[in-house]
Amino acid sequence: MATPVVHSLREQIREHILEGIVGGRWQPGERIVERRIAAELAVSQTPVREALRELESLRLIESSPNKGVRVRELTATDLKESYPVRAGLEQVAAELAAPVLAEDVSALEPEVAALYVADRAGDGEAQVRHTVAFHREIVKAAGNAVLLHTWESLGIEVWTTLSIRWLSPEPRAHAEDHAEIVAAFRRRDPAIGELLKTHVLSCAPQI
Protein backbone atom coordinates (compact mmCIF):
# COMPACT_ATOMS: atom_id res chain seq x y z
CA MET A 1 0.00 0.00 0.00
CA ALA A 2 1.38 3.45 -0.88
CA THR A 3 2.38 5.74 1.96
CA PRO A 4 0.07 8.75 1.69
CA VAL A 5 0.98 12.32 2.47
CA VAL A 6 0.12 12.89 6.11
CA HIS A 7 -0.22 16.12 8.02
CA SER A 8 -0.51 15.19 11.67
CA LEU A 9 0.79 12.76 14.25
CA ARG A 10 -2.65 11.16 14.48
CA GLU A 11 -2.69 10.52 10.73
CA GLN A 12 0.80 9.00 10.81
CA ILE A 13 -0.23 6.68 13.64
CA ARG A 14 -3.43 5.73 11.81
CA GLU A 15 -1.44 4.82 8.70
CA HIS A 16 1.00 2.78 10.80
CA ILE A 17 -1.86 0.76 12.28
CA LEU A 18 -3.50 0.38 8.87
CA GLU A 19 -0.27 -0.98 7.43
CA GLY A 20 -0.24 -3.50 10.27
CA ILE A 21 -3.81 -4.61 9.57
CA VAL A 22 -3.36 -4.78 5.79
CA GLY A 23 0.06 -6.41 6.08
CA GLY A 24 -1.17 -9.07 8.45
CA ARG A 25 0.62 -7.98 11.63
CA TRP A 26 -2.77 -7.95 13.37
CA GLN A 27 -5.10 -10.69 12.25
CA PRO A 28 -8.91 -10.53 12.45
CA GLY A 29 -9.93 -10.93 16.08
CA GLU A 30 -6.50 -10.01 17.40
CA ARG A 31 -6.13 -7.33 20.06
CA ILE A 32 -4.38 -4.03 19.27
CA VAL A 33 -2.74 -2.73 22.43
CA GLU A 34 -2.84 1.07 22.59
CA ARG A 35 -0.02 1.29 25.14
CA ARG A 36 2.27 -0.93 23.06
CA ILE A 37 1.79 1.17 19.91
CA ALA A 38 2.48 4.36 21.87
CA ALA A 39 5.74 2.90 23.23
CA GLU A 40 6.75 1.56 19.81
CA LEU A 41 6.27 4.96 18.15
CA ALA A 42 7.53 6.95 21.16
CA VAL A 43 4.32 8.98 21.41
CA SER A 44 1.67 9.50 24.08
CA GLN A 45 -1.44 7.34 24.12
CA THR A 46 -3.73 10.26 23.22
CA PRO A 47 -3.00 10.40 19.45
CA VAL A 48 -3.01 6.59 19.35
CA ARG A 49 -6.48 6.62 20.88
CA GLU A 50 -7.63 9.21 18.31
CA ALA A 51 -6.25 7.13 15.43
CA LEU A 52 -8.01 4.02 16.72
CA ARG A 53 -11.30 5.94 16.91
CA GLU A 54 -10.96 6.82 13.22
CA LEU A 55 -10.33 3.19 12.33
CA GLU A 56 -13.36 2.19 14.37
CA SER A 57 -15.45 4.64 12.31
CA LEU A 58 -14.24 2.76 9.19
CA ARG A 59 -15.48 -0.44 10.87
CA LEU A 60 -12.03 -2.01 10.67
CA ILE A 61 -11.67 -2.40 14.42
CA GLU A 62 -14.07 -2.69 17.32
CA SER A 63 -13.73 -1.88 21.00
CA SER A 64 -15.46 -3.14 24.12
CA PRO A 65 -14.90 -2.46 27.84
CA ASN A 66 -13.83 -6.03 28.57
CA LYS A 67 -11.95 -7.02 25.42
CA GLY A 68 -10.19 -3.79 24.46
CA VAL A 69 -9.58 -2.94 20.80
CA ARG A 70 -9.54 -5.75 18.24
CA VAL A 71 -9.42 -6.12 14.48
CA ARG A 72 -12.94 -6.91 13.33
CA GLU A 73 -13.77 -10.37 12.01
CA LEU A 74 -14.69 -9.02 8.59
CA THR A 75 -16.86 -11.01 6.22
CA ALA A 76 -17.24 -10.81 2.46
CA THR A 77 -20.50 -8.94 3.09
CA ASP A 78 -18.63 -6.31 5.14
CA LEU A 79 -16.15 -5.85 2.33
CA LYS A 80 -18.88 -5.63 -0.29
CA GLU A 81 -21.15 -3.10 1.43
CA SER A 82 -19.19 0.03 0.54
CA TYR A 83 -19.28 -0.63 -3.22
CA PRO A 84 -22.88 0.49 -3.96
CA VAL A 85 -22.25 3.68 -1.95
CA ARG A 86 -18.98 4.29 -3.74
CA ALA A 87 -20.62 3.56 -7.12
CA GLY A 88 -23.30 6.18 -6.50
CA LEU A 89 -20.73 8.79 -5.46
CA GLU A 90 -18.53 8.09 -8.47
CA GLN A 91 -21.50 8.29 -10.84
CA VAL A 92 -22.14 11.83 -9.59
CA ALA A 93 -18.41 12.61 -9.70
CA ALA A 94 -18.08 11.44 -13.30
CA GLU A 95 -21.03 13.57 -14.41
CA LEU A 96 -19.63 16.66 -12.66
CA ALA A 97 -16.09 16.03 -13.88
CA ALA A 98 -17.05 15.23 -17.48
CA PRO A 99 -16.58 18.76 -18.94
CA VAL A 100 -13.17 19.12 -17.28
CA LEU A 101 -11.88 15.66 -18.22
CA ALA A 102 -13.20 15.91 -21.76
CA GLU A 103 -10.68 18.72 -22.24
CA ASP A 104 -7.78 17.24 -20.29
CA VAL A 105 -7.31 13.65 -19.07
CA SER A 106 -3.64 14.08 -18.19
CA ALA A 107 -4.35 13.40 -14.50
CA LEU A 108 -5.72 9.95 -15.39
CA GLU A 109 -3.20 8.80 -17.99
CA PRO A 110 -0.20 8.15 -15.68
CA GLU A 111 -2.35 5.88 -13.53
CA VAL A 112 -3.46 3.86 -16.56
CA ALA A 113 0.16 3.56 -17.73
CA ALA A 114 1.16 2.36 -14.27
CA LEU A 115 -1.70 -0.15 -14.29
CA TYR A 116 -0.41 -1.70 -17.53
CA VAL A 117 2.96 -2.20 -15.81
CA ALA A 118 1.32 -3.60 -12.67
CA ASP A 119 -0.88 -5.96 -14.72
CA ARG A 120 2.13 -7.36 -16.57
CA ALA A 121 4.03 -7.85 -13.31
CA GLY A 122 1.05 -9.30 -11.46
CA ASP A 123 1.69 -6.72 -8.74
CA GLY A 124 -1.54 -6.67 -6.73
CA GLU A 125 -0.47 -3.88 -4.38
CA ALA A 126 0.45 -1.58 -7.29
CA GLN A 127 -2.85 -2.42 -8.98
CA VAL A 128 -4.74 -1.29 -5.87
CA ARG A 129 -2.64 1.84 -5.47
CA HIS A 130 -3.04 3.04 -9.05
CA THR A 131 -6.68 1.99 -9.36
CA VAL A 132 -7.60 4.00 -6.27
CA ALA A 133 -5.47 6.95 -7.45
CA PHE A 134 -7.26 6.87 -10.82
CA HIS A 135 -10.69 7.02 -9.21
CA ARG A 136 -9.57 9.69 -6.74
CA GLU A 137 -8.53 11.92 -9.68
CA ILE A 138 -12.03 11.62 -11.15
CA VAL A 139 -13.62 12.58 -7.83
CA LYS A 140 -11.18 15.49 -7.44
CA ALA A 141 -11.95 16.68 -10.97
CA ALA A 142 -15.62 16.99 -9.97
CA GLY A 143 -14.61 20.05 -7.96
CA ASN A 144 -16.94 19.29 -5.07
CA ALA A 145 -15.27 19.26 -1.63
CA VAL A 146 -18.21 17.52 0.08
CA LEU A 147 -18.18 14.75 -2.51
CA LEU A 148 -14.42 14.26 -2.17
CA HIS A 149 -14.59 14.20 1.63
CA THR A 150 -17.43 11.67 1.59
CA TRP A 151 -15.60 9.47 -0.92
CA GLU A 152 -12.36 9.62 1.11
CA SER A 153 -14.25 8.73 4.29
CA LEU A 154 -15.15 5.33 2.82
CA GLY A 155 -11.54 4.18 3.25
CA ILE A 156 -11.52 2.85 -0.31
CA GLU A 157 -7.83 1.95 -0.54
CA VAL A 158 -8.03 0.02 2.71
CA TRP A 159 -11.19 -1.89 1.80
CA THR A 160 -9.92 -2.66 -1.71
CA THR A 161 -6.64 -4.00 -0.35
CA LEU A 162 -8.38 -6.09 2.29
CA SER A 163 -10.78 -7.48 -0.32
CA ILE A 164 -7.85 -8.71 -2.39
CA ARG A 165 -5.76 -9.95 0.53
CA TRP A 166 -8.47 -11.68 2.54
CA LEU A 167 -10.78 -12.96 -0.18
CA SER A 168 -7.96 -13.85 -2.58
CA PRO A 169 -9.83 -13.35 -5.85
CA GLU A 170 -8.32 -14.60 -9.06
CA PRO A 171 -5.72 -12.17 -10.49
CA ARG A 172 -7.22 -9.86 -13.07
CA ALA A 173 -6.03 -7.10 -15.36
CA HIS A 174 -7.19 -3.57 -14.62
CA ALA A 175 -5.55 -1.28 -17.17
CA GLU A 176 -7.88 -1.94 -20.11
CA ASP A 177 -11.02 -1.17 -18.10
CA HIS A 178 -9.55 2.13 -16.96
CA ALA A 179 -8.27 3.00 -20.44
CA GLU A 180 -11.86 2.60 -21.66
CA ILE A 181 -13.06 5.06 -19.02
CA VAL A 182 -10.46 7.60 -20.18
CA ALA A 183 -11.64 7.12 -23.76
CA ALA A 184 -15.25 7.68 -22.68
CA PHE A 185 -14.34 11.00 -21.05
CA ARG A 186 -12.42 12.03 -24.18
CA ARG A 187 -15.35 11.35 -26.50
CA ARG A 188 -17.79 13.09 -24.10
CA ASP A 189 -19.86 9.94 -23.66
CA PRO A 190 -23.23 11.10 -22.25
CA ALA A 191 -23.50 7.83 -20.30
CA ILE A 192 -20.18 8.34 -18.48
CA GLY A 193 -21.84 8.39 -15.04
CA GLU A 194 -23.62 5.09 -15.60
CA LEU A 195 -20.43 3.62 -17.10
CA LEU A 196 -18.40 4.44 -14.00
CA LYS A 197 -21.13 3.20 -11.67
CA THR A 198 -21.26 -0.15 -13.49
CA HIS A 199 -17.47 -0.38 -13.43
CA VAL A 200 -17.28 0.14 -9.66
CA LEU A 201 -20.03 -2.38 -8.96
CA SER A 202 -18.22 -4.95 -11.11
CA CYS A 203 -15.22 -4.66 -8.77
CA ALA A 204 -17.18 -5.67 -5.67
CA PRO A 205 -16.28 -9.01 -4.06
CA GLN A 206 -18.49 -11.79 -5.38
CA ILE A 207 -20.35 -13.59 -2.61
Image (spheres, grey):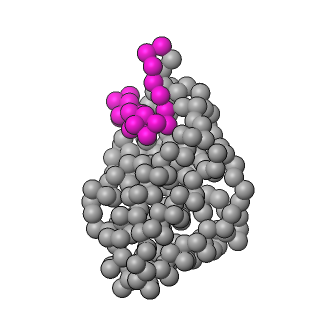
Snapshot quadrant of residue 23: top right
The N terminus lies in which quarter of the figure?
bottom right
Q: Position of residue 177 (x, y in %)?
A: 58, 72
Which residue does the image show at 35% across and 71% down from the upper left?
95
Q: Tell me: 37 left or right of 114.
A: left
Magenta stretch contains residue 46: yes
Magenta stretch contains residue 18: no
Q: Position of residue 72 (x, y in %)?
A: 54, 31
For the residue pair 38 and 42, the one nearer the viewer reads as: 38
Q: Exactly how many numbered labels are in the figure? A: 0
Residue 21 visible in the displayed image:
no
Q: Is residue 133 above or below residue 7?
A: below
Snapshot quadrant of residue 11: top left
Which residue does the image show at 60% across and 41% down from the upper left?
76
Which residue does the image show at 49% across and 52% down from the upper left?
83
For the residue pair 5 and 171, the one nearer the viewer reads as: 171
Give the magenta range: 45-66
Residue 163 visible in the displayed image:
yes
Q: Position of residue 80 (x, y in %)?
A: 55, 46
Q: Position of residue 97 (x, y in %)?
A: 34, 72
Q: Tell me: 77 left or right of 141.
A: right
Q: Is residue 177 above or below residue 6?
A: below
Which residue does the image show at 43% across and 51% down from the upper left?
85
The C terminus lies in which quarter of the figure?
top right
Q: Tell me: 66 left or right of 128.
A: left
